[in-house]
Image (tube, helix red, strand yellow):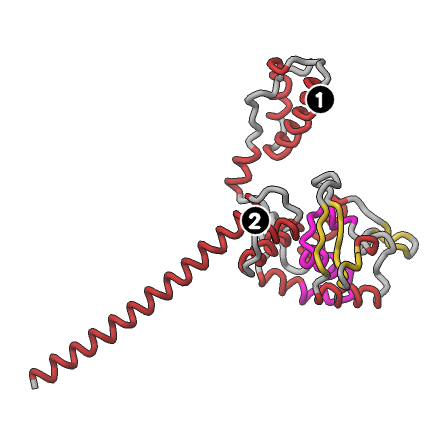
Amino acid sequence: MLTRKVIKAEMKARTPSQAGNLLSAVRGMIRWMIDERHLDEDDDPTIGLKSGKAKASRETGGFVPWTEDDMARYRAKWPLGTEARLMFDILHYTFLRLGDAHRFGPPHLRQIVRKMAVQIATEKSQGNTTVTVPVHPEFAASLRAARAANIIGAEVFTGKVVRGRVLPMNKKAWAAKFKKYAVLAGVNEPKKSCHGVRKARAEVAAYADCTESQMMAMFGWTDPKMPAHYIAQANRERLGISGMQKIITFDQGQSLDDGLARERRAGTEW
């Protein structure tokens, strides 16, 4: 029997992230049972249960965004025309989540208003949200180099090579392969993964003054809180920088005025 006590015991035996995923799955099943009238809403055993996933994410900061130094180190290790570089460029220039990046391939390129664009229905939305992003010029160059090196598949751009063919691989294997390439390039912090590249690009989008709507379209978000977080962070840092510049200007002005006053006093004394 699926009681509250059983659910709590199962959650306690897992990490906060795993417990959160379990709770979400159970709640989905319970919701179905209530809708089908197999269970009364007041008898929902998940009411009030918390996994600690959100708190753990706040405390650890979640995935860590890649820095410009990280990216430069990775590019230096893996030049254009290598599988490692193509995997990075897919993440860096398309902003796709891992669940979409691992299955991204030639069928997801479309000609839209005379421009080549990435167009893919996202896994997280179960296909209900489609991301459309024009192909970045540097990503186009990366694809040309990869094609010249004959490392691109017909169904996916990167995957597992079987008898000379590039075939799809599951997202966990794709993420593990990318992490291996990152570690070999010297980017070996535990929380710097595929998603860290996406977070870094979200920061860039906010600094580039992209609007909430533009960021939602590019990153496949449906909740405006996501772009608002990055935009607020960029605005705080910009305000801090501009505020400090005003302080510096004021201090320098004060120093000049003090110096002139001292000179005037000295002249009077002579």
Q: Residue at x 68, y 26 (%)?
A: 28
Name the spot of residue 238 as percent of width and height, x first: 45, 59
Q: Which quadrant is the N terminus positioned in?
A: top right
Q: Amino acid at mark 1?
A: Trp
Q: Residue at x 56, y 49 (%)?
A: 227
Name the spot of residue 9 as percent of width and height, x first: 61, 21
Q: Residue at x 65, y 50 (%)?
A: 217
| Picture layout, residue 75 above or below residue 127 | below
Q: Is residue 99 visible?
A: no
Q: Which residue is mark 1?
A: 32
Earlier sequence position, callout 2 versus callout 1: 1
Name the spot of residue 192 as percent of width and height, x first: 61, 51
Residue 227 is left or right of residue 154, and the answer is left
Q: In the rendered structure, which segment of residues is drawn in magenta?
A: 75-103
| Foreground of the two, 93 or 125 | 125
Residue 124 is left or right of residue 157, and the answer is left
Q: Residue furthest right?
A: 163
Q: Which residue is mark 2?
A: 227
| Picture layout, residue 256 above or below residue 37 | below
